[in-house]
Image (cartoon, helix red, strand yellow):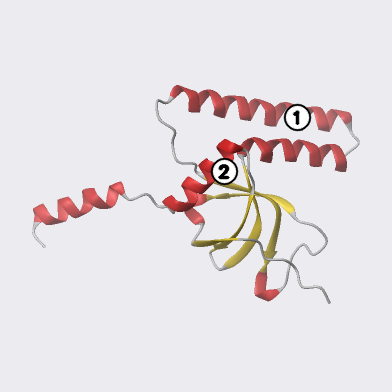
Amino acid sequence: MTEDQSSVASKEKEKIPDFDIVLSVLISSFAEYGIGIGVTLNVKGLIISGELISREKYFKGIIQETERANGDSEMIKIVTDTFTTMDKIIKDKLSEKEKKPFPNYIHLKNARFFPGGNCTPNNKGVLWRGRLSEVDGFSIGNLSPQTK
């Protein structure tokens, strides 16, 4: 390969994002319309299945989980203020940009993990946030725990 070919190949490689554009568009589209959809992800060999939600719903879910799990009003206030502030900062940064960027993270509710064919947690799913660039593959639809 000549130096010019190597330079062109390098520039073309720089244009290819390190995440699945199809999954990214799904995340953006469903988040924009506030619709959840079941997805199953392969992340470094671990299967994760849940309902795709927006960043805003994820943050609200964290606040709600804190309220349910912790009666300490001081802790609830800290978590609420922290996630409300983070959401505002992110929204302000996104509105400064002319075009919508691809999302960097994926958010799930009722997420379940399937290591070695088992389901964790087996009682109810959890909120989960992961880096989109770490997702190796995905399919539409949820896996569910086997009932015995």
Q: Position of residue 141 (x, y in %)?
A: 62, 61
Q: For the N terminus, give its image quadrant.
A: bottom left
Tag in front: 1 or 2: 2
Q: CA distance from mark 1 to mark 2?
A: 25 Å
In the picture, measured across the screen, residue 90 lies left or right of residue 12, that is: right
Q: Position of residue 111 (x, y in %)?
A: 69, 56
The front one of 118 and 37 is 37
Q: For the C terminus, give its image quadrant.
A: bottom right
Which residue is the site of mark 1? 80
The front one of 81 and 61 is 61
Residue at x-position 55% and y-position 68%: 45
The disc labelled 1 sits on which kind of residue? Thr
Residue 30's disc is 2
Image quadrant where residue 63 sits: top right
Residue at x-position 10% and y-position 55%: 3
In the picture, measured across the screen, residue 85 lies left or right of residue 69, that is: left
Most distant residue in the right direction: 71
**Secondary structure of the residue carrying numbered label 1:** helix
The disc labelled 2 sits on which kind of residue? Phe
